């Protein structure tokens, strides 16, 4: 039962993290929007770089990207909490039942990993050269979140073998 509880609590921790991220993005919309706007406009990348053709300075496109990130985070958050609930319901069942209950959580954690990898590290970090910006660089935070979520996913992927919960 200890390993099951650990999996549930760590998953709930990731769900709480996502809930707070969505809350912050909505309650402090403009601050976080400014971050996205600056990354997309590439206005603080190294002078003279030859990738400035990639910039997106249209407020409409900036909002599309920002709302896309928030929606991705929101979907991940809902699925994470749904996964927590499924594991809580299955915690006293047989190992096969607990293992079967992990599906939603695995999908949610994978969506979260893809958010940090694709949206922040790939697109923001490399396509829009966020790594060149001293002020508007979210790669460290994205890498931290990717690592935390990845560790929880690896733990959750370990099949439960307890014969008596």
Image (tube, rainbow, N blue to C red):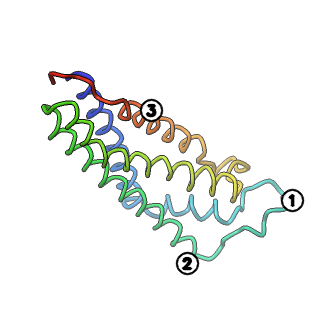
User: Are the two marked residues, 3 and 2, in contact with CB atoms closer than 8 angstroms?
Assistant: no
Q: Which of the numbered marks, if any, corresponds to residue 151? A: 3
Question: In terms of secondary structure, where does tag 1 sit?
Answer: loop
Q: How far apart are marks 3 and 2 (CA)?
A: 36 Å
Determine the image quadrant of residue 163: top left
The quadrant in which the C terminus is found is top left
Q: Is residue 83 left or right of residue 39?
A: left
Image quarter of the N terminus:
top left
Q: Is residue 79 above or below residue 14?
A: below
Q: Residue tagged by mark 2?
A: 60
Which residue is disc 1 drawn over? 48
- Residue at 31%, 46% (x, y): give it: 103
Question: Which one is in front in this view, the residue at disc 3 or the one at disc 2?
Answer: 3
Please say if 71 is above or below 145: below
Q: What x and y, as percent, mark residue 130?
A: 67, 53
Residue 96 spot, x, y in % from top left: 22, 35
Secondary structure beneath dot 3 equals: helix
Q: Residue at x 27, y 36 (%)?
A: 99
Look at the numbered disc 2 and give the secondary structure of its residue. Answer: helix
- The residue at 72%/57% (across/down) is 44
Residue occupying image coordinates x 48% and y 46%: 113
Residue 80 located left or right of residue 71: left
Q: Position of residue 49 (x, y in %)?
A: 84, 58
Mark 1–mark 3 distance (CA, rounded to whole Å): 39 Å
Q: In which quarter of the image is residue 5?
A: top left
**Front-most of residues 163 and 40:** 163
């Amino acid at each position: 039962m200890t390993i099951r509880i650990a999996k549930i609590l760590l998953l709930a921790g990731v769900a709480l993290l996502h809930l707070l991220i969505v809350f912050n993005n909505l309650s402090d919309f403009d601050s976080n929007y400014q971050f996205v706007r600056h990354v997309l406009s590439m206005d603080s990348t190294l002078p003279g770089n030859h990738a400035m053709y990639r910039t997106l300075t249209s407020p409409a496109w900036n909002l599309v990207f920002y709302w896309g990130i928030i929606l991705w985070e929101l979907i991940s958050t809902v699925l994470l909490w749904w996964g927590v609930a499924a594991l809580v319901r299955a915690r006293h069942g047989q190992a096969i039942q607990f293992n079967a209950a992990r599906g939603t959580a695995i999908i949610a954690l994978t969506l979260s990993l893809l958010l940090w990898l694709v949206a922040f590290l790939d697109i923001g970090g490399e396509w829009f050269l966020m790594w060149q910006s001293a002020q508007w660089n979210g790669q460290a935070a994205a890498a931290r979140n990717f690592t935390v979520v990845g560790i929880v996913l690896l733990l959750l992927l370990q099949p439960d073998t307890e014969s008596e919960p």
